[in-house]
Amino acid sequence: MVAQQYLHTADNGPDINRSKELIMANEYVQNGDFSDGLAHWVTPEDFEPDFKPMGEGAGQSIKLNIGVAISQSIVDLRTKTLHIEFDVMSADLRLDEVLFVIAVGGYNQEGAMNLSPVIGLATQQWEHISGDIKFGELLEDFFLNISAPSEAFILAFSNSRLASPYGPVRFANLSLSTIDAEDADGND
């Protein structure tokens, strides 16, 4: 899935939409609002989090510097479609846009990995990103990785513009949920 300026569609790629409300959903990310610090998240050994409150009762955001990724495993999930939501912004107000990458993936019955990236540009304002990730087959043992990529990351979509500067990114309110059957057809 490509967020903001880019839209990538493929048979097993995600469809992006903004602020879709799910009537019935099961949430699979634990501590997606970072209200319990880094509980449930796997981080680099020397990672020192920089949290900022998101407002009264809204948890907090986390800052990821260039080249830092954190992740979470979701073992008790078998599905072909996930709904993802998160808030993102540039953590360096001197940079108008910075690149971010979120990867959601899982494994099929044969053990082969299926991965769907969410690539976008974080701006100086909070933006809420929401979309459905449709995998071509039933997957299990899911994972979620969020990162502020380093300069070694190469954006390789055809017809894409040059990547904006690399820089630190703030993430908040991360959510992965399964979609109720009534919502799966795209009708609200």
Image (cartoon, grey):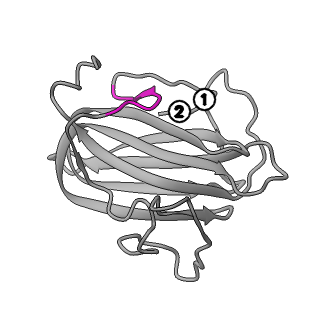
Look at 74% across and 51% down and name the residue there. 166
Quick check: 164 above or below 46? above
Label 1–label 2 contact, CB within 8 A: yes
Quick check: 46 above or below 154? below
Picture mark count: 2
Q: Nearer the viewer, mark 1 or mark 2?
A: 2
Q: Mark 1 = which residue?
A: 157
In this view, which residue lies farthest toward the bottom?
46
Residues shaded magenta: 12-21
Give the camera-side residue of 8 and 30: 30
What x and y, as percent, mark residue 74? Answer: 26, 59
What x and y, as percent, mark residue 174? Answer: 43, 52
* Magenta stretch contains residue 114: no
What x and y, as percent, mark residue 47? Answer: 58, 78
Alpha carbon separation for disc pair 1 and 2:
10 Å
Q: Residues within 10 Å of mark 1 (few under 14, many from 20)?
A: few
Q: Amino acid at mark 1?
A: Phe
- Residue 82 visible in this rendered orientation of the protein: yes
Q: Residues within 10 Å of mark 2 (few under 14, many from 20)?
A: many
Q: Which numbered marker is on residue 111?
A: none
Look at 52% across and 75% down and name the residue there. 44
**Quadrant of the snapshot with the C terminus:** top left
What x and y, as percent, mark residue 180? Answer: 18, 33
In this view, which residue lies farthest toward the right?
94
Q: Which numbered marker is on residue 2?
A: 2
For marks 1 and 2 on the same chain, the one whose residue lies earlier in the sequence: 2
Give the camera-side residue of 52 and 134: 52
* Magenta stretch contains residue 19: yes
